[in-house]
Image (spheres, rainbow, N blue to C red):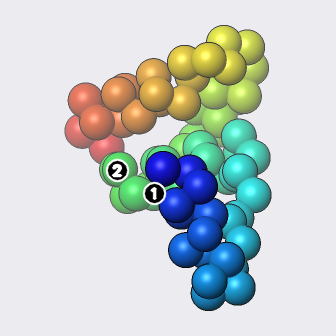
Amino acid sequence: IDSLIEKKLDSYNLRPNKIASEEVFLRRAYLKVIGRIPTFDETKEFLEDRDRSSKKSALVDKLLGSHG
């Protein structure tokens, strides 16, 4: 499927965006899911988490279960 997507992008002379940094991902996730930016403490907690394999999905699960 990746090759099909790549061919379609090439046909429009487009390139995929770079992967967002952790800081950008965090801000976007908070804004999209609960409508606000993360607090300093929330930002610090996310950035200090070294479990790169699951921290993004864990954040989204946490935000989906929150009340803002």
Seen in the picture, residue 38 relative to 42 is either above or below; the reply is below
Q: Is residue 68 above or below residue 45?
A: below
Which residue: 59% across, 55% down? 3
Which secondary structure lies at badge 1?
helix
Q: Which residue is mark 1?
A: 31
Q: Choose top left, top right, bottom left or bottom right for residue 35.
A: bottom left
Other-residue count near label 2 (Cα within 10 Å), few / some / many at <14 / 14–19 / ≥20? some
Residue found farthest to the top:
51
Which residue in the structure is indicated by mark 2?
34
Q: In which quarter of the view is residue 36 placed?
A: bottom left
Contact, mark 2 vs mark 1 (Cβ under 8 Å): yes
C-alpha gap between disc 2 and disc 1: 6 Å
- For image coordinates 63% across by 27% down, the residue present is 46
- Mark 1 burial class by Cα count in 10 Å: few <14, some 14-19, many 20+: few
**17 or 9, which is in the foreground?**
9
**38 or 18, nearer to the observer:** 18
- Given the image, on which type of amino acid does mark 1 rest? Leu
The answer to whether residue 64 is seen in the rendering is yes
Disc marking residue 65:
none
In the image, residue 13 sits, relative to residue 41, either above or below, namely below
Residue 37 visible in the snapshot: no
Residue type marked 2? Ile
Find residue 16 and report its image quarter. Answer: bottom right
- In the figure, is residue 13 to the left or right of 36? right
